[in-house]
Image (cartoon, rainbow, N blue to C red):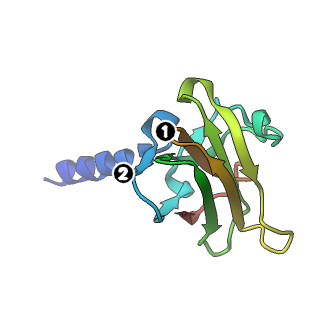
Amino acid sequence: MLRFLCFAMMASTAHVAAQNTECAMATTITSLPATLDGDLAIAPPITHLRTDSCAIASTGPVPGNWYTFTAESDGCLTATVESTSQPFFDTILTAYVDGCDALSCAAMNDDISIFRVDVSQLNINVEAQTTYHFFVRGLFPQEFGSFTFNIT
């Protein structure tokens, strides 16, 4: 019985850790506004993301979470990520368009101000029927923790 319980707990943990850590497995946001909680502490490092396409120098494999949203109409979208960890971590929020196999940078923000490195925010003019892929990460591989992702 104990062996089964340990196996069940490991299987459950593995499932949580794999959730939305790849672009193709992103959490889909179906309506706005949306608020989602995440935790980079359980995300594996992502090694194959081209961070240079969004003017961020590559800092090595970093844990991150993916979210997608398809705009129903043209308009303006605001996406914000805020560290909820204590101590907080330095957040980066990136938005991409095109498919997961050919991501193209739409916008990136590393800190809303020099006084708030724990919050990153994007304001994007969106086009109808376009899917936007959002990637939440810390600035460096050792910067991770819990966060809240808001999109309006």
Residue highlighted by disc 1: 129
Rendered-image quadrant of the C terminus: bottom right
Residue at image x 46%, y 47%?
Answer: 72
Query: Circle 1 — which element?
Result: loop
Amino acid of disc 1: Gln
Q: Position of residue 79 (x, y in %)?
A: 61, 59
- The percent position of residue 37, horizontal first and vertical second, equals 48, 64
Which residue ends up furthest to the top in the rendered image? 101
Residue 32 versus residue 46 in the image, above or below: below
Q: Label 2: which residue?
A: 13
Q: Determine whether label 1 and label 2 are within 8 Å by CB.
A: no
Report the residue at 35% width, 45% height from top.
15
Give above or below for 129 relative to 78.
Answer: above
Looking at this view, name the residue that lies furthest to the right: 114
- Report whether 143 appears left or right of 131: right
> What residue sits 78% from the left and 72% below the top?
116
Is 57 left or right of 23, judged from the image as shown? right
Please tell me the numbered disc located at residue 147: none
The residue at the far left in this view is 1
Mark sitting earlier along the chain (1/2): 2
> What is the spatial separation of the Cα atoms under label 1 and label 2, in whole angstroms?
35 Å
